[in-house]
Amino acid sequence: MAGPRMSLRTFKRAIVATVALAVLAGVSLFVHGWYAHRDDQCARGVTRMEEPRSECVGITDGSYDFAEHLSAVSEKIEQANQDVTKEDGKYVTVAYMTSVTVDENDSNSEESVRHELQGAHLAQQRHNEHSTPKIRLLIANTGSGSAHWRHTVDELIELRDGGEPLVAVTGLGPSTDRNLAALRRLSAAGLATVASTMTATGISGIEGFVRVAPTNVDEARAAARYLRRKEIRTAMVVQDVAEENLYADTLGDAFTEEFPRGGKEHRLVADRKQFDSSLDDSWKNELQILSNQLCFHRPEAVYFAGRGRHLTHFLDALAERFCTEWDFIVMTGDDTTNLTDEQVRRATDSGVQVFYTGLAHPEMWKGEQGGPPGAVQAAFREGGLLEQWFGRERHIDGQAMMAHDAVLTAARGAQMASKGTRVTGRAVGRMFQLMEDGGQKRGASGELTFTENGDMRDKKVPILKLAPNGDPVFVMVLSPRG
């Protein structure tokens, strides 16, 4: 009888051992997965992506610094958010989304990103001091080149669906296919959207969308009007034809159409000269060849329809042209504001005068010191509020002003939508079209009123010139429509 009993006992022990091993294996897999997941997390709501480069993307309330140079503004935003959530009373959430982590291939620089977040925080503080509902501001990073826009957009939508009172996403980055796709995805999810620096013409038919920057058509028209005022009679267009560069495409088309409207004395002396910045191995060589071709046509002005970082290489090439005795000027668009100090110095060292249409400038309304928007712009000037908060740092690139106006627009929309009803993204988006006749808000760049297609109404464009020390010198303000 002992034999069968021993066999049963052994069988039971084997079962227990098998179960124990299975449990241990499960625990081991869970722990391994937890550690692996933990390694992917840079912070709560922020995930590390390894491709196409290692960077942390996602959403933070300011408690996480996407980059060291953003620590001061992140801390300010975090503190403001804590003040909002501690107080009794309702608040809504607005995200500022852009490529926060950038490299040399991005059109926006670290400085421009920092200034955008500083301007966004200024709008948050300005609104929260006097208006309700208060604004909780989130920073949303889509990664360099917006490579991870889908991840970050999905995180924002999931956050809203999970109970966060997110009603609007602002910023949205430059005019690229990826950023436009992100914009459309956010709109389809019922969130209001306000672009700060997106200038490509023809962005329309998107529910709840407005932008505070001038369009490329407005910029090109203002540029052409300025050149005609300077009695420039001949011009030539140099354009980037990279497939995803909507900014360059619409700038080139608009200037080509507008400049000759001044009459027979104003003409383009040649067909557009083109280069393709997407060809990493040849675009610099293309610009070198183009600079010498210009010597044969000798226009009085060259309109450069391309990004700022490509402009510096074009100016380098012009400095080495074989007709250095020929004097002319270069006119270009607002992406020049994204140049770093080093790139600006390179541009001015070329010996060519460079003018460009900006998004905004603190001197635009300086003559209106007694009232807005001049009073608002004082915050961006030397000794102004931003300098008091963040130290001696110039805010003459317009980036802080545009971000300020984008967040302020969203905040004003939330305020208008809060009258006796629950604030939703769709309700906020509906309010943008009603910001007129006393309902508008005075921004840093002008009155925040919008046309039916989402463009700012009668947007004024500053003409700027690069000074020898690299500063953008304010020249004048022009209306694209005369």
Image (tube, rainbow, N blue to C red):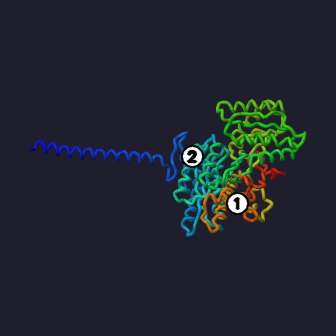
Disc 2 target residue: 150
Q: Can residue 393 be seen in this view?
A: no
> What residue sits 67% from the left and 64% below the top?
416
> What residue sits 56% from the left and 49% below the top?
152
From the top left corner, tell me how far across and down residue 148 is, in percent: 57, 45
> What residue sits 26% from the left and 44% below the top?
18
Q: Do the residues labelled 1 and 2 touch (CB within 8 Å)?
A: no
Question: Is 37 on the left-hand or right-hand side of 398?
Answer: left
Give the amino acid type for the residue marked by disc 2 in the picture.
Arg
**Local SS, label 1:** helix
**Local SS, label 2:** helix
Q: Quadrant of residue 296?
A: top right
Q: Quadrant of residue 318?
A: top right
Q: Which of 440 and 98 is in front in this view?
A: 440
From the top left corner, tell me how far across and down residue 257 is, in percent: 81, 41
Question: Is 74 on the left-hand or right-hand side of 458?
Answer: left
Disc 1 target residue: 379
Q: Nearer the viewer, residue 178 or 317?
A: 178
Q: In which quarter of the image is residue 281?
A: top right
Give the amino acid type for the residue marked by disc 1 in the picture.
Ala
Q: Which of 291 and 236 is in front in this view?
A: 236
In the picture as drawn, the residue positioned furthest to the bottom comes out as 88
The correct choice, above or below, for 427 with respect to 98 in the image is below
The correct choice, above or below, for 41 with respect to 427 in the image is above
